Structure formats: C-alpha cells, structure tokens
Amino acid sequence: MSKRIKIGLIGCGMISGSHVNGYLAHPQHAEIVAVCDTVDANAQRRAAEVLSGAEARANSAIADAEKADTAEARDRLKENAARWAEYKDNGVEIFSDYNEMLKKCELDAVSLATPPFAHEAPTVAAANAGKHVFCEKPMARTATEARNMRDACDKAGVKLAYQSGGTCLDPRSYAIREYVTSGKIGDVHYGRLTSYRVRGRPNVDMFGFGKWFLNSMYSGGGTLYDTAVYLINRSIYLLGSPQPATISGIAYRGMPPEYTGEEINDVEEFASVFVRFTNGMSFTYENGWSCNMAGQPQGIFIFGSKGSFSNDKLFLEKGEWEIDDQGNRRRYRENLVETPLELPDMHFPDKFRDFIDACSSDAQPVSNGDIGLKVTEIMSGALLSAKLKREISVEELYEIEALRTEPTPGWPIP
Ligand SMILES: NC(=O)c1ccc[n+]([C@@H]2O[C@H](COP(=O)([O-])OP(=O)(O)OC[C@H]3O[C@@H](n4cnc5c(N)ncnc54)[C@H](O)[C@@H]3O)[C@@H](O)[C@H]2O)c1
C-alpha cells in the first residue's frame, strides 16, 4: 500500500469541493490536514465540509460493513471507517496564507484550487518547501509561469500533477496512445480537435462562477483556458507528448447576447489554433464556449498513413486495394474498416489517486507538469499569435512573454 499522503488544500472556492471528495475517497492513501483561503469564510466552510464528509462516510462504511458479503470487504470497510473517524480527533487546520501553512503544517503535498493567477507562486513555494503539487487547470496563464512551475518541482524532486479532468486516465485513451506511438496506424502526421458550446460563457451565459474567468489578467484567457485546455491536454497525451514548435491562432469575441456585467471582459469566446510539432506532426484545435455551430462532428480526429482515429473509433486499412478498369482505387472506402480497439487489461485510477500514487513512487502523474507546459505553450502562443496576426515559434513566445511588464499576464482580445 502506498504511504498516506498529508494534503493541504489551497483555495476553497467552487471547485475545491471536488478536491475534498477526491481525497476523502481514498482514506487509506490520503488525508486532508489543512485548508487555506484568503477569504476566511471559504476556508471555514471547506474545513467543516471535510469533517462532516469524513463523518458521514465513516457512518455509512460501518453500516455497510455489517452487510458485507465477504470478510475481506468487511475488513476494508472497517479500515476505511477508522481512517475517516480519525478526522474527528485530528481536525483540519485553517490558514489564510499558504506560506504560513507550508511553514507550520506537516504536509506531503498541496492541492491547488485557486484561480490561474494564483497557481505559479504557491506551486513554486510548495516545491521549495519539498511538497508535491496537484494544480487545477489551466496550469498557468503564460508559458513562462508554467515553465517556472515545472522547473521548480523538477529541481526540488517533487511531483507536479495538474487536473485535466481525468481525460487521459481511461482504457481508450491508453489504447489510442499505444496505437499512435507504436506506429500501428502508420506515420501520424495530422490531427484535428473540435469542441463547441452553443452558449456556455461563465458569467455571461452561466452564472455562479468566479469573476476572474472573463479577465485575461487573472485567467490567462477565455475558452481556450477554460474548456479547450482539457482536450489539448488529451491530444498531447494521445500523440505521445510531442513538443510544439510553432503556433498560429485566431481568436474572436462578440457573440450575442452581449456581456452586460461591470467586470472586465477581454477574453476570447472562440479560437482556432494550428500547431506544428518538432516531430513533424501538426494539429488544428477549434474551440468555442459560445458559437452557432450545430451538425458538425465534434471530437478528436487523428490521421495516420495506415489508419486513423475518428473520435475513439479506430479505422485501419484491410486487405488489398481494389483497382477499377480505369486504374482508380480512390473510391474503395470499404478497405478502411472500423476495427475494435485492443483495450488494456488494467485498472485506471481517478486523477486524485493517480497523483497520490505518484507522490509515493517513482512514477510521474499521467497528467504532469511536462504535458501541462506544452498545453500552456499552445494556449498562450495561440492568443499571442492572434494578437500579432502571424505564426510564432515557441522560442519567440518566451522572448515576448519576457518583455511584458506587470500586471499583464494573458493576451487580451479587443
Ligand atoms: N468552477 C469550475 O467549474 C471549475 C471546474 C474545473 C476547474 N476549475 C479551475 O479551478 C480553479 C479555481 O476555480 P473556482 O471556480 O473554484 O474559483 P473560485 O473563484 O470559486 O475559488 C477560488 C478560491 O481561491 C481563493 N484564493 C485566491 N487567491 C488565493 C491565494 N493566494 N491563497 C489562497 N486562496 C486564494 C479565493 O478566495 C477563492 O475562494 C481555476 O483554475 C479553475 O479554472 C474550475
């Protein structure tokens, strides 16, 4: 069994509830010992939720143990109940400053559920204190911030996971990556990813979200940073983690109904991005959290010289190509047949367990800082390219990010 990891939660807003549930689900492997938020009421609320959640789980595990079919199941439920019951005695410490928490609390890891503008500094502070980091998506606002986070964790020898919605932790994603990287679909040269919401802009169409979502200085960007981020992450994983070389993007904001709030709204609602990778592959990402597009296939499409993936369906060449009287073979589409995916016979952990396991082993989290950095290069590069109206290289992205003065992160869209 892996070591029981002591977690400090930083940021106790909307999404932090999923972190609480995520760690409470693994009582033998993780324990939330502290929470931190600059807003005391938020920290108090989450701390109380950790305690009440643990108590409720302990009670139902005890009741379930009475009804368990096997001795093994009964013992496991009782062990879990004992771990959850410990929260009542141990309590959860509450902090308003994460540096204090890192100093005063005995932690193995921090779980960051702060907005993007507050990802880099706590990650670097936690790494310097020797703590592993689980960071909410998007990893950072700029490639430079993401690189600082990755480098700080590498230097300290701690793990950096970032939340990708668990988009890689399933048998299909694992199998597709195997097909792509082993050459089974030939030379993978191109891919396309499309994802559209009709109306799904936080604080414009959907309410109850942090005000920072629409302000590029706080969020880094709009739909790319909020929704495409998961899918770009999955594409990088499926392609075997290629390194972006050049990026070209366009971005748009202006869909009705208009934003009528008082906060700054300078982020993109739609973006199209073309990326060339150093290994010769290229990829198009088309994403919008507000667009009038229906009837268009959405998902991920991967083009190989011997086959393809259309979403999660595999198509492979089968048999000899037939040639007609005129010597044509172009119409014989039936030679490209849907082929069942060979799925791995293995268990896939959820994203929190994947992180917990990485903290107590040599393994890297599946969604790790290296992948997060590439994703951030694509997002920040796309918006800079849109601004400059031309393709940029990743080297140029870092050079231009370095020229900026504070407070600037994010590339506002006019
Ligand atoms: N809301 C969602 O549906 C959702 C879903 C998935 C991921 N996320 C991601 O999770 C992160 C947080 O989003 P949210 O919706 O929970 O935001 P939120 O605004 O609801 O909560 C953020 C919390 O962080 C606190 N905070 C800010 N700076 C801090 C600091 N320096 N130290 C300690 N606490 C600080 C705030 O007081 C607030 O309580 C973002 O990166 C977001 O993209 C959000």
Image (cartoon, rainbow, N blue to C red):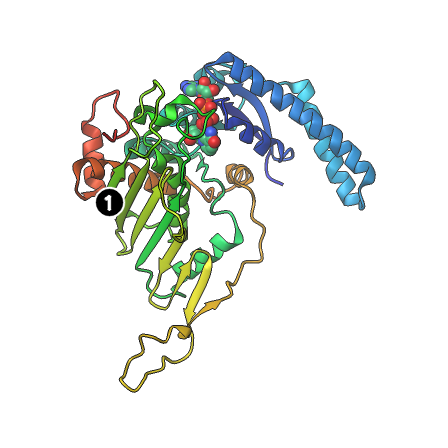
> In the depicted view, which residue is nearer to us: 164 or 395?
164
Q: Quadrant of residue 353?
A: top right
Label 1: which secondary element? strand
Give the farthest residue toward the right.
Answer: 66
Q: Position of residue 60 (x, y in %)?
A: 74, 32
Q: Could you tell me which residue is drawn at 19 percent across and 34 percent down?
A: 399
Q: Quadrant of residue 251?
A: top left
Q: Position of residue 337 (x, y in %)?
A: 44, 70
Q: Quadrant of residue 336?
A: bottom left
> Image height check: is 121 above or below 63?
above
The image quadrant where one finds the C terminus is: top left
The answer to whether mark 1 is within 8 Å of ligand 1 is no
Q: Is residue 398 found left or right of 172 in the rendered image?
A: left
- The reply to whether residue 98 is in sight is no
> In the depicted view, which residue is nearer to us: 295 or 345?
295
Q: Could you tell me which residue is drawn at 29 percent across and 44 percent down?
A: 272
Q: Is residue 160 found left or right of 32 in the rendered image?
A: left
Q: Could you tell me which residue is drawn at 52 percent across and 27 percent down?
A: 16
- The reply to whether residue 390 is in sight is yes
> Image height check: is 266 above or below 43?
below
The image quadrant where one finds the N terminus is: top right
Residue topped by disc 1: 247
Give the farthest residue toward the bottom.
Answer: 325
Q: Position of residue 294 (x, y in %)?
A: 39, 48
Q: Is residue 237 found left or right of 1 in the rendered image?
A: left
Q: Position of residue 307 (x, y in %)?
A: 38, 66
Q: Residues within 10 Å of mark 1 (few under 14, many from 20)?
A: many
